Image: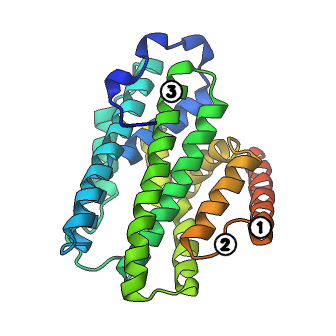
Amino acid sequence: MGKWTLDDIPWGEFDRSKLDPGILNLVKAASLVERNGGDYTTYLCSVFHDDPEFQAAARLWGEEEIQHGEALARWAALADPSFDFQRCFQRFAEKIQLPLTAAISVRVSRAGELVARCIVETGTSSYYTALAEASEEPVLQAICRRIAADEFRHYKLFYTHLNRYVATEGLGTWGRIRVALKRLQESEDDELAFAYHTANLGEVPYERRAASRAYAKRAYALYRPHHVERGIGMVLKAVGLVANGRLGRLVSGLAWRFMRHRARQLATV
């Protein structure tokens, strides 16, 4: 799927009868996170301050992330006219702040930063694929399919630059695995939890644990084995391991069992 704009979305096909309240809540939260791509672009360009090739790619990536947020926000407003995206985003951006002028990556090395970006793009590509397949609303399906394709392309972009920096910085497989595990652990940090809270529970005092559970309860339920298998393959490739074969099957199976267990656990909360 090639480059697209908001005008390519079939807004006229919106079908209110096929809305799912739980999915709507997830989309509201996702619109805030995606729209924050501008700050991530600034951060990446600061870390890669002497790499104009990567900076150009990062700026294009950021523009596409912002468009993702705008598309999701527009759909959410169709589904729930009371959703005040601008107000929610302002609150979100005030709390979730990045080190915009950082000269060194929070992952210590540039290769580590690119591993982390690959992990994020793996997660978002899988997530929007799962969201598109779980939703019955045709406009949301169209948006999520486009976003999922973009995120997969973004993964390949960061992976290409990762190979450049691994060659010069020498970040080995174990170092890449440590970065990947740390970034996976951060999936339950303040960003997603506060996005969900701000978009859906804004007048209630923020409690990270409660908001994280509310988000995860709905998000984990979206996934199916093929989403996990594909995502694990992308993660293994990013850390320098063979994605196909016995290792991939083993890790995918373990990851799927964990997600099923977590989904059942959250369903009782």
Q: CA distance from mark 2 to mark 1?
A: 7 Å
Badge 3 vs badge 2, beta-carbon distance below 8 Å: no
Q: Is residue 240 visible?
A: yes
Indicate the amino acid at tag 3: Ala
Badge 2 vs badge 1, beta-carbon distance below 8 Å: yes
Please identify, in this view, whether the residue under mark 3 or under mark 1 is nearer the observer: 1
Name the residue nearer the viewer: 18 or 46.
46
List x then y, in percent, for residue 223: 69, 45
Q: Which residue is mark 2?
A: 242
Q: Residue at x 28, y 53 (%)?
A: 94
In the rendered image, which quarter is residue 7 located in? top left
Mark 2 surroundings: few (<14), some (14-19) or many (≥20) residues within 10 A? some
The label number, if any, that marks residue 245 in the structure image? 1
Indicate the amino acid at tag 2: Val
Q: Which residue is mark 3?
A: 142
Please identify, in this view, whether the residue under mark 3 or under mark 2 is nearer the observer: 2
Indicate the amino acid at tag 1: Gly
Q: Residue at x 36, y 86 (%)?
A: 168
